[in-house]
Image (cartoon, rainbow, N blue to C red):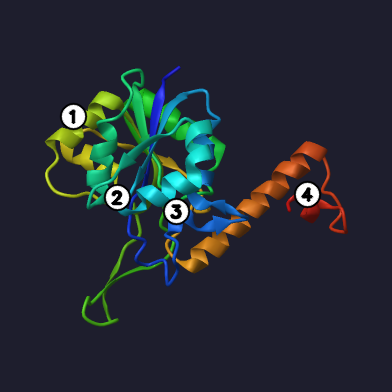
């Protein structure tokens, strides 16, 4: 069984998240920080030997004070991020355990990841060396004038996919790709693509959304609540009544 190191970047500025004192990885869903939902997906996996959480320098004091118990219980490796996302991943790669032979990167702000999706992308990465989750673009795509909200052209959605995470790679391939890459990248598959190695796509549900706005946060809460309902129904065999002492109470 491959031994994965999982990097969870949480060092972004959250500039589009709205007027709030909390950055999106630290926003709460049912009294738990968003990044914890993401990290817990991997903490329970037998094929994950290390979890690295990457935070902004100015968040370190808050993070250690607020999440010290989680750091200890989940045995997290804490890394300080850089100016851009690619810089943060580079910093994390320098701390990847020698015992891990694959690396996965998962956005801290994607709390709705399904276990079977992780299984599939991990399996594919072990087979081909590089794989990402992605969903086909189904809406009509327009290119707009950057100076005003006016359509310039309609783009065919054929063969267009929206990249998601986790993105998983053979460790030494990813290390070589980052060492060779110049500039910045918006995701890690871009770095491996530039290195010349093919990256496989594993189709994933759009419910694996990345929280960017306050509306996304509310949508993620509904998705997680729905997933909890399904888990309880599966466990009990039938859906409990929605009266007092029922499913809603079990979900808190």
Q: Is residue 210 visible?
A: no
Compared across the picture, whether 128 is left or right of 39 comes to left
Q: Position of residue 173 (x, y in %)?
A: 24, 27
Compared across the picture, whether 37 is left or right of 17 comes to right
Compared across the picture, whether 197 is left or right of 55 comes to left
Q: Give the camera-side residue of 251 and 239.
A: 251
Spatial CA distance of label 2 from label 3 is 15 Å
Q: In this rendering, is residue 131 above or below 112? A: above
Name the front one of labels 2 and 1. 2
- Name the residue: 11% across, 44% down: 182
Spatial CA distance of label 1 from label 4 is 48 Å
Residue at the spot of label 2? 57
Q: Check if mark 1's residue and mark 4's residue have beta carbons within 8 Å.
A: no
Spatial CA distance of label 2 from label 1 is 26 Å
Provide the secondary structure element on which disc 3 rests. helix
Q: Earlier in the sequence, mark 2 or mark 3?
A: 3
Spatial CA distance of label 1 from label 3 is 29 Å
Q: Check if mark 4's residue and mark 2's residue have beta carbons within 8 Å.
A: no
Q: Check if mark 2's residue and mark 1's residue have beta carbons within 8 Å.
A: no
Q: Earlier in the sequence, mark 1 or mark 4?
A: 1
Q: Earlier in the sequence, mark 2 or mark 1?
A: 2
Provide the secondary structure element on which disc 1 rests. helix
- Name the residue: 24% across, 48% down: 82
Name the front one of labels 1 and 4. 4
Residue at the spot of label 3? 25
Within 10 angstroms of label 4, few (less than 14), some, or many (20 or more) residues? few
Name the front one of labels 1 and 3. 3
Q: Earlier in the sequence, mark 3 or mark 4?
A: 3
Spatial CA distance of label 3 from label 4 is 26 Å
Residue at the spot of label 4? 250
């Amino acid at each position: 069984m491959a031994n994965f190191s999982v990097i969870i970047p949480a060092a972004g500025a959250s500039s589009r998240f709205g007027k709030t004192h909390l950055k999106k990885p630290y926003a709460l869903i049912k009294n738990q920080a968003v990044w914890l939902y993401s990290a817990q997906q991997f903490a329970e996996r037998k094929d994950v030997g290390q979890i690295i959480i990457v935070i902004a320098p100015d968040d370190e004091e808050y993070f250690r004070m607020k999440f010290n118990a989680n750091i200890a219980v989940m045995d997290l490796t804490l890394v300080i991020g850089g100016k851009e996302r690619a810089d943060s991943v580079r910093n994390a790669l320098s701390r990847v355990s020698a015992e891990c032979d694959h690396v996965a990167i998962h956005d801290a702000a994607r709390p709705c990841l399904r276990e079977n999706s992780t299984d599939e992308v991990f399996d594919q990465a072990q087979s081909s060396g590089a794989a990402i989750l992605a969903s086909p673009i189904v809406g009509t795509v327009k290119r707009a004038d950057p100076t005003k909200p006016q359509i310039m052209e309609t783009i065919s959605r054929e063969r267009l996919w929206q990249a998601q995470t986790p993105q998983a790679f053979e460790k030494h391939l990813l290390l070589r790709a980052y060492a060779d890459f110049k500039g910045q990248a918006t995701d890690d598959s871009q770095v491996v693509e530039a290195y010349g190695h093919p990256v496989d796509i594993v189709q994933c549900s759009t419910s694996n959304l990345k929280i960017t706005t306050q509306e996304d946060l509310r949508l993620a809460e509904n998705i997680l609540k729905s997933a909890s309902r399904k888990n309880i129904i599966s466990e009990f065999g039938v859906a409990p009544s929605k009266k007092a002492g029922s499913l809603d109470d079990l979900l808190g």
